[in-house]
Amino acid sequence: MTAIDDLITLLDLESIEVNIFRGVSPDENRQRVFGGQVAGQALVAATRTIEDPGRTVHSLHAYFLRPGDPTVPILYEVDRIRDGKSFTTRRVVAIQHGRAIFNLQASFHIAESGLDHQLTMPTGLPPAESLPDFKTLMEPHRARLGDWYDRPRPIDVRYVDDDPFTRNGVPSYEQRVWLRADGKLPDDPTLHACIVTYASDMTLLDTSLLPFGLSWETPGMQMASLDHSMWFHRPFRADDWLLYDQRPISTGGARGLAGGNLFTTDGALAITVVQEGLVRVASR
């Protein structure tokens, strides 16, 4: 199986009771569950309770409450808060060891037409195929990355700017990456939304460090996702290239806030993401 096949399997939760689902973590040497994994699985749990296939997620808001334990399953309990004529709302709580580790609220909307306006996609950027993949880009830093370098990656990420290590010490105010699922996906909009939810937790919080010329590898740096919000605007495919245009919004009080817009290659604004995280530097 390929890495993207493993991710699809990871997101295919087991139904163990009405409104209760169980997910597992990949067999990797991690200290805690990857935030994008629990967010993606929680969205899967919510969508499994949507009876109208014409309703797709248009927004989600989540809080990371405790570090997830990658060695035990995660239970997802879904609360069917509301089923309206146009909108459906669900609340999902992820539980391990008898305690909530994550909370998500998601809203689903029927397809409707209306006014149309969006931010403009940045221009003049190199196409994704012209940029090195992760292993090629990070080869000079292989020893520093250890076994993380060789870990299978279901999401192909291509940095438009230089790699995070090379940018150390150089303040900046934007980060742009191309990303897509590394393989062909079934024609299921729900799966595409869940995979992009998984991928949206990658690289974004790092953006809050850019104005200081720092990175997550800076000695004494402690970073963790606190909350995560997404708005789904227009159709997209997770196995087509998406430009993740990211910017720091505010860093202070040991927290960092960053925002990102995901554009399709034809310029459509597909998704907006905002994330806040813990940003502590022990020496400061």
Image (tube, grey):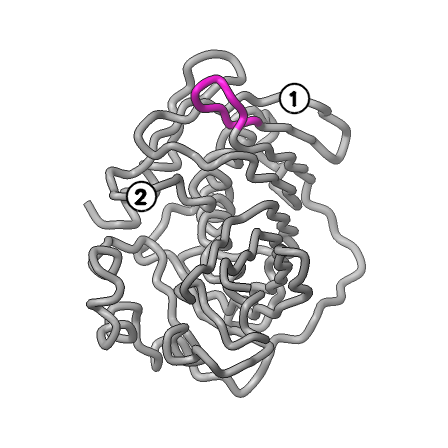
Q: Residue 249 lies in what quarter of the image?
A: bottom right
- The amino acid on which the numbered mark 1 sits, given as a three-letter code, is Arg
Residue shown at 37% from the left, 74% from the top = 165
* 248 with respect to 223 (left or right): right
Q: Quadrant of residue 93?
A: top right
From the top left corner, tell me how far across and down residue 224 is, in percent: 50, 49
Residue at x-position 50% and y-position 54% = 200
Q: Residue furthest front?
A: 283
Residue at the far right in the pictured view: 115
Q: Which residues are magenta?
A: 93-100
Element assignment for label 1: strand
Image point (51%, 34%), residue name: 66
- Where is residue 31? Give x, y as percent: 34, 42
* Residue toward you, 78 or 183: 78
Which of 119 and 208 lies nearest the eye of the viewer? 208
**Which mark is on residue 30?**
2
Q: Nearer the viewer, mark 2 or mark 1?
A: 2
Q: Main secondary structure of the magenta part?
A: strand
Which residue in the protein does label 1 denote? 80
